[in-house]
Image: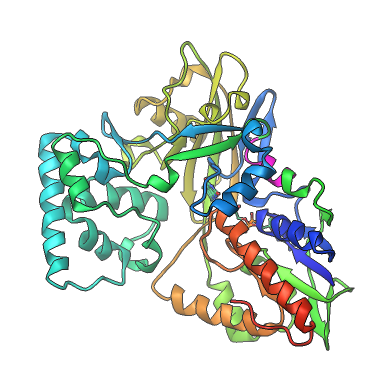
């Protein structure tokens, strides 16, 4: 078949590579000057930075992990790191996840957190139902102390809203759930480890996270057209037309609100649903510093409190690969979320870096480079109407004859490994279509 893939992020190029290997003629149409989407990296002199905050290679699925590592040049092309993540809790460094690090708080805070956790545990055992909103879910799952000491300030910083307006359904599998034994152990000083599927990760030695995208494109056997913003997609009988060119099948991976106007057939109610799918945007600060001594061996840290500035997470990026910064230098990525209103200027950059200085993360006078990059579509804002809205939207696409997937192409809140996993499923689905004939077009879910 002749297949058009809209969007050349990791979802688009991964699928293109798989389909081309089956002998299909595949064209990837990408708006930007190069493939990569949220996985892009960029260089400033001898510094390399990721554009959308710190990205790591990891997966719960070995087949997907192998696929990703192979695109990055395997073990030889990557640096393997044992994750070391912390929360900057006032003047202390607390291991992440917070529940596993509770023993590192002040004695008063330990008692507050453990008492609240036990209370919440008892309530749940007594049948307290899982709340539908995220604000109440935090209290229900973690208790009062964990909520006040970390979960509420941290999440308010990322999501920029009253947490009661957000759904709780998305947290399953994302916010780590520690067993009560782990919390009690940590409280009395016995270290425990949480979030173990991510305890080791990889990163490309050269070129930043984007190296994985290059590895998917190189020798992929498909055509990549960059600088092409798709504006018109339509179906005529059994054929599809993308800006006038005929295809047998069209797969979308572009964020739905950015592509909806190109699809003539979308009915008005579904169009309204798509337009209501608001993203959370991300300003990523790329900071280069001169070093007197090596950076502490941290992977990334969380900054929950307003007095630490607007940054919610800092990646110790030169720790991911020695080639991310020149000799004698280090680099950080500082992530600041917003809802479309933030326009950084030099004064704002200085104030963010000053706050990182006050939080004991860097010395502002050692900064030799500070740049920023805005990512409009970074996180999915899941309000209480999100689940019904996205179900209607997906249902329309899944009956349309088109296929749509990707972090914002299906609003599934996926990391790149899950995008690759989804690409594998779409690949299988298209194998079915080629067997049964394009006209039958079984439904993708
Ligand atoms: C802060 C942050 C940290 C993350 N950390 C990790 C991590 O550590 N590990 C990990 O695996 N994942 C991580 N992720 C997730 C990862 O970045 C995404 O899952 C993945 O990059 C999404 O890929 P995609 O192809 O689905 O979408 P995108 O990357 O958004 O690609 C969509 C593409 O469509 C293009 N496009 C837009 N409009 C048009 C048009 N009209 N015509 C043609 N093309 C168009 C865009 O230019 C873009 O290239 C992180 C994400 C964020 C925001």
Q: Position of residue 405 (x, y in %)?
A: 63, 67
* Quadrant of image for the N terminus: bottom right
* Quadrant of image for the C terminus: bottom right
Colour scheme in use:
rainbow
Q: Position of residue 406 (x, y in %)?
A: 61, 63
Q: Is residue 425 above or below residue 114?
A: below
**Residue positioned 76% across, 83% down in the render:** 436
Viewer-closest of 287 and 204:
204
Whether residue 159 appears in this view of the structure is yes
> Is residue 175 toward the left or the right of residue 388 in the image?
left
| Image quarter where ligand 1 lies | bottom right
In the rendered image, the residue lying farthest to the top is: 292
> Is residue 38 toward the left or the right of residue 92 in the image?
right
- Image quarter for residue 74? top right
In the rendered image, the residue lying farthest to the right is: 245
Disc tally is 0
Q: Is residue 301 above or below residue 229?
A: above
Span highlighted in magenta in the image: 208-214
Viewer-closest of 344 and 151:
151
- Image quarter for residue 123? bottom left
Instruction: Provide the major secondary structure of the magenta segment.
Output: helix
Indicate whether residue 156 is drawn in magenta.
no
Q: Position of residue 422 (x, y in %)?
A: 60, 64
> Is residue 305 toward the left or the right of residue 127 in the image?
right
**Residue positioned 52% across, 46% down in the render:** 58
**Residue positioned 54% across, 54% down in the render:** 415
Viewer-closest of 391 and 13:
13
Whether residue 255 appears in this view of the structure is no
Q: Position of residue 238 (x, y in %)?
A: 83, 86
């Amino acid at each position: 078949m002749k297949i058009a893939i809209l969007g050349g992020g990791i979802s688009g190029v991964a699928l293109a590579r798989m389909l081309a290997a089956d002998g299909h003629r595949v064209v990837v149409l990408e708006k930007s000057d190069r493939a990569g989407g949220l996985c892009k990296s960029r260089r400033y002199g001898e510094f390399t930075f990721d554009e959308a905050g710190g990205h790591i290679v990891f997966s719960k699925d070995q087949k997907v992990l192998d696929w990703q590592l192979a695109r990055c040049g395997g073990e030889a092309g990557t640096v393997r790191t044992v994750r070391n993540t912390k929360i900057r809790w006032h003047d202390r460094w607390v291991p992440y996840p917070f529940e596993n690090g509770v023993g590192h708080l002040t004695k008063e805070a330990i008692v507050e957190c453990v008492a609240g956790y036990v209370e919440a545990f008892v309530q749940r055992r007594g049948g307290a139902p899982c709340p539908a909103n995220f604000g109440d879910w935090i209290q229900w799952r973690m208790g009062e102390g964990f909520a006040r000491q970390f979960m509420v300030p941290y999440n308010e910083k990322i999501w920029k809203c009253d947490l009661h307006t957000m759904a709780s359904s998305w947290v399953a599998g994302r916010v780590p759930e520690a067993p009560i034994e782990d919390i009690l152990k940590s409280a009395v000083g016995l270290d425990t480890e949480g979030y173990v599927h991510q305890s080791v990760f990889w990163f490309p030695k050269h070129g930043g996270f984007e190296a994985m995208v290059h590895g998917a494109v190189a020798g992929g056997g498909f055509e990549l057209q960059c600088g092409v913003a798709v504006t018109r997609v339509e179906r005529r009988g059994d054929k599809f037309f993308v800006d006038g060119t005929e295809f047998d099948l069209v797969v979308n991976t572009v964020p739905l609100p950015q592509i909806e106007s190109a699809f003539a057939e979308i009915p008005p109610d579904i169009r309204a649903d798509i337009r209501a799918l608001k993203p959370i945007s991300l300003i990523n600060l790329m900071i280069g510093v001169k070093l007197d001594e090596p950076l502490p061996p941290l992977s990334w840290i969380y900054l929950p409190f307003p007095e630490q500035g607007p940054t919610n997470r800092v990646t110790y990026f030169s720790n991911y690969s020695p080639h991310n910064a020149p000799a004698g230098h280090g680099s950080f990525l500082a992530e600041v979320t917003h809802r479309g209103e933030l326009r950084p200027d030099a004064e704002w950059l200085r104030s963010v870096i000053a706050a990182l200085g006050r939080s004991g993360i860097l010395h502002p006078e050692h900064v030799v480079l500070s740049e920023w990059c805005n990512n409009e579509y970074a996180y999915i804002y899941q309000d209480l109407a999100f689940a019904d809205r996205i179900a209607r939207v997906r249902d329309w696409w899944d009956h349309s004859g088109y296929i749509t997937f990707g972090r914002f192409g299906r609003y599934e809140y996926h990391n790149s490994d899950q995008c690759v996993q989804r690409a594998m499923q779409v690949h299988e689905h298209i194998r079915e279509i080629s067997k049964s004939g394009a006209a039958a077009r079984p439904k993708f879910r």
